[in-house]
Every structure is written in structure tokens, then in C-alpha cells.
Amino acid sequence: MTKASSNQPPPLVDYNLYDADPPLSESLEREGAAWAHDLIHELGALAGTEQAIDWGFQANANPPRLRTHDRFGNRIDEVEFHPAWHELMKVSIGHGLHALPWRDPRPGAHAARAAAFYVWSQVEGGHGCPVSMTYAAVPALRKQPDLAAQWEPLMTTLDYDPGLRVPATKKGVLFGMAMTERQGGSDVRANTTTALPVGAGGVHLLTGHKWFCSAPMCDAFLVLAQAPGGLSCFLLPRVLPDGTRNNFHIERLKDKLGNRSNASSEIALEKAWAVMVGEEGRGVRTIIEMVNHTRLDCVIGSASLMRQAVAQATHHTAHRRAFGKLLSEQPLMVSVLADLAIESEATTILMMRLAGAFDRSHESTEANFKRIGVAIAKFWTCKRAIAVVAEALECHGGNGYVEESILPRLYREAPLNSIWEGSGNVNALDVLRAMQREPDSLAAYFEEVLSAPHDSRLQRALDRLKHEIADPDGIEFRARGLVERMAVALEASLMLRFGEPAAAELFCASRLDGEWGHMFGVLPKGHDLKSVIERHRPRLYGEG
Ligand SMILES: Cc1cc2nc3c(=O)[nH]c(=O)nc-3n(C[C@H](O)[C@H](O)[C@H](O)COP(=O)(O)OP(=O)(O)OC[C@H]3O[C@@H](n4cnc5c(N)ncnc54)[C@H](O)[C@@H]3O)c2cc1C
């Protein structure tokens, strides 16, 4: 008979993800969103339950299925989801993760929503896609006030009401977006989907193909298509007001590396009914409002993946022994864990600082900081999440590599944030564009970084940056290195201002002072690493 296991950690379940995350709760307060404490505390408790964790596993083990036709041969273009997906969605929508700042636009609302989205996404990332797109569609839709008046009330209810029905009859609706085509995703100006004007009120018929269209069971989509006056943005509902289905045909679902709970599809539009949003020929300018918000969510998603990975790694190593000691007491593991922890802390603080800038974007400096900060953070945090998750997985040894652990799912999810909503290079180039066309954004960046207490290492990094930026020679070729250094300097300044002092010191000593390797776990000697790790280690209920 097999003996009971020994030296295996207890599962990381029955804990509150919010209580276990001081950098998050501190940031929530700092960004003026302490009023949301109860909401996020409740989500943190729920996210730590066996039930919610199981929904995450179930939704990924049972991916969505495409049903193109009903049993009578009628085209239906529906996707079926496992009940666990619907449970996850119900929690997200029920807690306003898709709409909080639009429902209750008080100071700190974006920061509150960011914290809530970050906590709940740690259970399962895939279902965040339609939640994020619905949140992000609102500011784009507001470019067309009559449409916003009609749709926004439905997009902001707390009712998750799945199924394709006439939108006006539903308790709540969800939005997606369809920009990417076979011949070009980053370069959306290459879109060939056509929009034929057919009547008053901006009504057009759209014909073409979209190569990636996630969450196709959403009620409506913002779509880019070529109108007579150029590339324009359209609102395309799946069901028309008379109850008939729009000519939106799902050709197949993508077989993806990760993000498996979510459906991503290829769609064909055949004279599909749509109505223009914003000005004709200014489609990119209209939809960029949506893209900016989904880019913020890529930062939140990356922070959330890092945090969950660090929580798992600090928990595992605090309970597993090797060579006569807990792993968390082995000097080399201490170096790895502390390095991961400060990366996660810096990302959480950066994410909350950015969300705060969305809240304060009526102030010009904040709007300028947001403009460049989102691109910098999207570039860097999405890249770092991949490395953090891989290293945290390795902290578990073989246990991290098996599907019963959440680590393989985090690992497969991580690269996605760096691809969609503008891949790495596209974001690095967007930082250059911001610097060149909107120089106030660069000034706001330096103002932000210089607001940290003086630190000679940070000052040297900024001097180097100024020098690099002033030299136009080969700047596009150098963009990745430049944006990486901008991101690290920004994180260092935020850590100096708001991080735990030992963590901030370690961050600057490693990331700015050259005593660092090309992987995690290469830290300078002589720092208080244990306290840094303990700050990031989650405690199960009743655990000391
Ligand atoms: C799971 C998933 C879901 C998605 N869901 C949606 C969705 O719902 N709606 C939607 O519209 N799209 C969606 N996308 C598409 C996604 O936004 C695109 O894949 C992305 O924008 C990149 O476009 P592309 O695939 O055409 O790659 P390309 O544009 O061909 O880019 C390929 C590579 O070249 C780089 N590159 C591009 N231009 C330059 C340049 N000038 N200089 C240097 N490098 C450059 C890019 O950074 C990238 O690394 C989804 C993608 C995935 C993977």
C-alpha cells in the first residue's frame, strides 16, 4: 500500500489573496481607492476558496466548443462553455470588474477596479478577456454619444446574462473587438474588410474576414472596416433588434497555447449590419480609446500572473525541505525568491500607479504620464511576467511542471499579454511615437521619475536615458533597450517612493547598479532578503 506523502506542502487554498498582498493594499489606499477595500477583500476571500480555484481548473480542462449549426442545419454560430466559465463570469460581472469606473466614477475607481481585476484574475485569466473588452469599449463608444446612451446602461449592469438574444431585452451585455485580419494585425491600416453605407444614422453593411476575434459570444463588437472615407470603427451586434442573427459567422476556434478557457475565433462577415462609431476615416483614433484600456489590463494581467506565481513559490518553498532545511532557508533559493518578490512588488505598484493616472487623467500631467506610461509598462511587465512565472515554476521542482498545479496554466497564459493589444515591438515603437509627437508625455515621465527621493543610482540611470533619447541615430533599432531602461527607472522610482524600504533598496542595488545577472536569483550580498520574502508569502487561514 502507498504510504501517505511526506514533505509535500499543503495546497495553497483557504487564504485571502488581498490580505496576503501588502503591496496591493498599500497601493489601493495611496491611489485613493481605500473605499473599495470591502469589495476587494471579498473577492480575495472568494479567490482563495477551493470552489473558485476548481472553477479555474474546470474551465481550462473543458475548453469551449463551437457549434456552427443546430440539429436542423440552421446556422447558429454559437460557442458552448463549461458551467465553470459561467461561474467565473458571474463573479466578475457581479463585482463590476467590467464596469466599475463607469458605474461609479468617483476618484480612485480605475485603481479599485484594477485591484479587483488583479485579485480575481489570479484564479483564472482566460475569462478576463470579455470582461476587459467590455470595460474598454465604453470610452470608445462615448465618441458616439447616441450609441453610448443606448448601449452603456446595458454594458454596466451587474448582471451576467449569457446567450444570444436581442440586446435591449437582456439584463446585461458584453462587448468584444475585431481588428486583426489575416494580412495584418499590428498594421490595422492594411484591413480589407469593407463597410458599405446603406442608410441614415451611420448604418453600413460589413463584408470581410477577421483572423482573431476573441469571446465571439459577446453581444456586440467594435470592428474596424474600410468605409468610403477610410478605415472607420463600427458597432456590430450579434443579434439585430428584430431578433434575427447578424451575418457574423464563426469559421473556427483557435487551438491556442494557453488562454484555453476563452474562445478565440476566426469570423466571416457577410453584409453584416453595423453602425459607425466616431468619425468616418478616424477608426484607429476611435478604437485606440479601447486599446488604451485593454493595454492597462495587459499590465494588470501580467502583475496578476506574477503575483500568483510568487505566492505559489513562496508558499511551496516555505513547506518543502531538501538537504536538511526548508527550501526557503537555502541561501540560493532565498536569492531567487527575493528577486521574484521585488519584481512582483514593483509591477503591482506600477500597475496601481497607472490605474491612478486613468483616474486623474483630467489633470494634464497625469494624462501625459498615462499616454507614455501605458506603452512603457505594457512592453516591460508583459515580458517580465514570462520570466517570473518560469522561474517560480522551477521553484516547485517537478511539482510545478504537472497540470495539477496552476503553474503550467500561468506559464502558458503569460506570453499572451505581450502579443495582443500591441506586441512587444509595437509598444516599444509606440513609446518612441509618444516621445516624438507628444513631447509633453516624455516630460511627464521624467517629472514622475524625478519625484522619488534622490538616489545616485537612479540619477545615473536617468542621465543615461536622457543621453540615449537625445541621440536620434538608430533610435528605432535601439527602442527595446531604451524602453526597458525607462521601465526599470520608473519602477525603481516607484519602489523608492512607495515600496517596502528593504525591497526598494534591493531593487535599486540589483536593477540599477550593475550587480545583477540575466536571470533571477543573482542578487548583491548583504541585504535583508528574508523580510522581503515573508512580505510576499501568503498565509493560510490559521497559519502563523
Ligand atoms: C489568443 C489571442 C486572442 C486575440 N484576440 C483578438 C481579438 O479579440 N481581436 C483582435 O482584433 N485581435 C485579437 N488578437 C490578435 C492580436 O491582437 C494580434 O495577433 C497582434 O496585434 C499582432 O498582430 P499579428 O498577429 O498580425 O502579428 P504581426 O502584426 O504580423 O506582427 C508579428 C511580429 O512583428 C512585430 N512587428 C510588427 N510591426 C513591427 C515593426 N514596425 N517593427 C518591428 N516589429 C514589428 C510584432 O511586434 C510581432 O512581434 C488575438 C491574438 C491572440 C494570440
Image: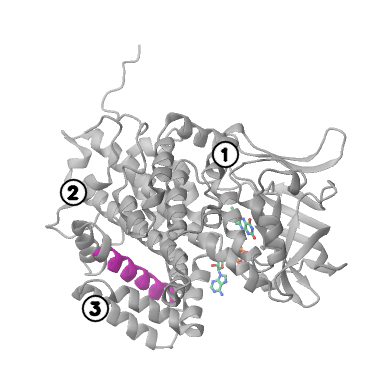
Q: Is residue 441 above or below residue 328?
A: below
The image quadrant where one finds ligand 1 is bottom right
**Protein image colouring:** one colour
The reply to whether residue 236 is visible in this rendering is: yes
Image depth: mark 3 or mark 2 in front: 2
Of labels 3 and 2, earlier in sequence is 3
Which residue type carries mark 1? Answer: Lys
Marks 1 and 2: CB-CB under 8 Å? Answer: no
State the residue position of label 2.
531
Cα–Cα gap, marks 3 and 1: 49 Å
Q: Position of residue 444 (x, y in %)?
A: 39, 78
Residue 214 seen in the figure: no
Q: Which residue is mark 1?
A: 90
In magenta, the rendered stretch is 479-496
Q: Is mark 3 within 8 Å of ligand 1?
A: no
**Image point (64%, 70%), residue name:** 286
Which of the labelled discs sits on residue 502, or is there none?
A: none
Frontmost residue, 393 versus 50: 50
Judging by the rendered image, the residue that carries numbered circle 3 is: 460
Rendered residue at 57%/64% (across/down): 291
Quadrant of the drawing holding the N terminus: top left
